[in-house]
Amino acid sequence: MADYSSQTFLNEEIRLPHTNFKIGVVTALWNSEITSKLKQGALDTLQKAGITNITVWDVPGSYELIYGANKLASEGFDAVICLGVVIQGETRHFDFICDAVANGIANVTIQHNIPVAFGLLTTENQQQAVERSGGKHGHKGEEAAWTILKLLERA
Ligand code: DLZ
């Protein structure tokens, strides 16, 4: 069975056809102490791969990632990385946001036929988010960027 643990999978070599891709990194400002780490990890990963044409766009909350991704996709970007953190609260807001973002981003990737990364942490608490933004459960910002690079091998 394939090993999907972060390390094994992220070490796989990326062979891009070129490095002139125009990539958008859209990041939610809600929970910015964590989303800023996700963004930095994504940017570092893209830069290590030689990508220089990167547009960074901070949007208010994760719900707005849908608009951000759709706007950049309609402007001709080759790929978009969406980053956000939604922490479960006492109301059903969590479910509505997570469902909307998952469906919204899926629609963008299908309608514009470009890779769009779903770098959305959906956690029960802040600690779980910390552990996934450079802690013991890896770095989901780096993974989101790696995912995009892997898909751009076929672009
Ligand atoms: C309103 C809201 C809440 C309660 N929680 C979060 C969250 O945990 N993470 C996040 O990124 N955004 C949250 N938001 C804001 C919404 O994503 C959105 O910005 C507002 O509902 C306005 O459209």
Image (spheres, rainbow, N blue to C red):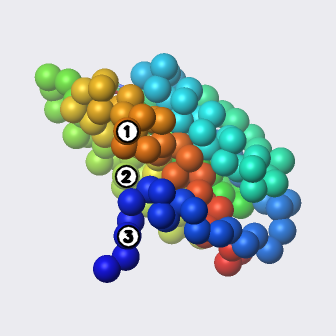
* Residue type indicated by callout 2: Ala
Look at the numbered discs 2 and 3 and tell me whether their residues touch, using CB distance below 8 Å: no
The quadrant where residue 91 appears: top left
Q: For the residue carrying disc 2, how many other residues have a C-alpha within 10 Å: few (<14), some (14-19), or many (20+)?
A: some
Residue 22 in view (yes/no): no
Q: Which residue is mark 2?
A: 102
Residue located at (67% from left, 78% from top)? 154
Q: Quadrant of the C terminus?
A: bottom right
The quadrant where residue 90 appears: top left
Residue located at (56% from left, 47% from top)? 142
Q: CA distance from mark 2 to mark 3?
A: 24 Å
- The image's mark for residue 4 is none
| x, y percent for residue 98 | 31, 43
Q: CA distance from mark 1 to mark 2?
A: 25 Å
Q: For the residue carrying disc 1, how many other residues have a C-alpha within 10 Å: few (<14), some (14-19), or many (20+)?
A: few
Q: Which residue is mark 3?
A: 3
- Closer mark to the observer between disc 2 and disc 3: 3
| x, y percent for residue 61 | 45, 28
Q: Which residue is mark 1?
A: 136
Residue located at (75% from left, 70% from top)? 16
Which is more N-terminal, label 3 or label 2?
3
SS for tag 3? loop
Residue located at (60% from left, 52% from top)? 145
